[in-house]
Image (spheres, coloured by chain):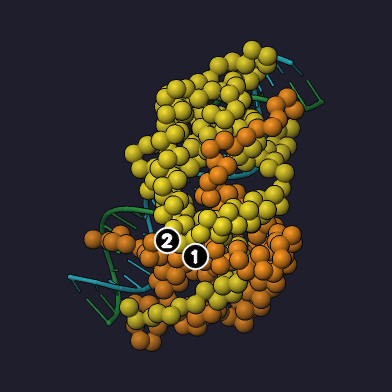
Chain colours: A yellow, B orange, C cyan, D green
Amino acid sequence: MSRDQVSVGALAPLVGYHLRRAWGAFSADFTAAMEGTGLRQVPFAVLSVVAANPGINQGAVGRILGIKRANMVSLINELVEKGVIDRAVDANDRRAFSLNATPQGNVLLAEAVGRIERHEQGMLADMTPAERSTLLDLLARIERRSPPTEADDGADA
Amino acid sequence: MSRDQVSVGALAPLVGYHLRRAWGAFSADFTAAMEGTGLRQVPFAVLSVVAANPGINQGAVGRILGIKRANMVSLINELVEKGVIDRAVDANDRRAFSLNATPQGNVLLAEAVGRIERHEQGMLADMTPAERSTLLDLLARIERRSPPTEADDGADA
DNA sequence: TATTGTTATACTCTATAACTATA
DNA sequence: TATAGTTATAGAGTATAACAATA
């Protein structure tokens, strides 16, 4: 190794840079945690939202998670084929689908959450409970600064 | 708007979820900040590292930023064609290129950093200086938990 | 034999635009 | 006319594998 002591230069004091690297570390850890479940980040998030909001439709799931309508389609197909969510025409609006987690989906979700929590404990092992809650609070305040979670603007027309 | 008060369910207490959303908000803000400079996240990071480490080679840049060798090629080409970095065969190792920021590159970097700092001030407007430094500290501690920044394992052979 | 850079390629994620069927 | 879902497609970003030149 001929060259070491490399500096990241102007990146060092930027919050965005550290947010990116921290996110990357968590992301890799998430992938490891999900090994064998067949769940990836976004499908896991979708399952979580559907389970928490019985009868929700695709558009609403996309809106809260920042996923475009067009990209929801294959996501939902994947989860339906996997047998973890159930899709039925909405009784009140025949354009929409009513989504629900299946019993199997709730089992998978619980299993996934358990794995993730254990992995997060590893990632945050050197933080006190107070520090973790400070981190969550600071991150939540940044999120609120993001645009109105408008996952889909005037894409049509 | 027929359905509101949607919950993210099991995602709510997960640090990884909030890290992802916070990162997304910063990411969108970064893109807006860079409008007109022609710089994207990764090229900006590469320019920053090259400027801070005169004569560094591609592999070392990739190693510190977590970018694979193969993906460095077009990145460096792009920055060279843009005239912001300079590539010359390394005098001590004729396999390697010695990279340097051009005067124009340093100007662009300074301009970009100024823009980003102003945007970050907007994103972090509701945080005290103490809170910002706490955030940076907590993020840095998470980063350190990531794998040895091995951007390139035994890809060959 | 290991390393630097290269090419080719593939897969995931996300984005836009145009379409249909309902409302 | 607006909305829910769909299809097709394109662009990033990142991954692997095999190769040449040099160490």
In the displayed structure, B152 sits above or below D10; it is: below
Q: Residues within 10 Å of mark 2 (few under 14, many from 20)?
A: some
The residue carrying mark 2 is: B146
User: Could you tell me if residue B25 is visible in this image?
Assistant: no
Can you tell which quarter of the image residue B147 is in? bottom left
Mark identifier at residue B141: 1
Position in image of residue A157 (x %, y %)? 74, 32
User: Dots 1 and 2: beta carbons under 8 Å?
Assistant: no
Q: Give the residue at x 45% y 27%.
A: A105
Q: Give the residue at x 46% y 28%.
A: A106
Q: Is residue A28 found left or right of A147 in the rendered image?
A: left
Determine whether the residue tagged by mark 2 lies in a helix, strand or loop: loop
In the displayed structure, B55 sits above or below B76; it is: below
Can you tell which quarter of the image residue D5 is in? top right
Q: Give the residue at x 71% y 62%.
A: B127
Front-most of residues B67 and B38: B67
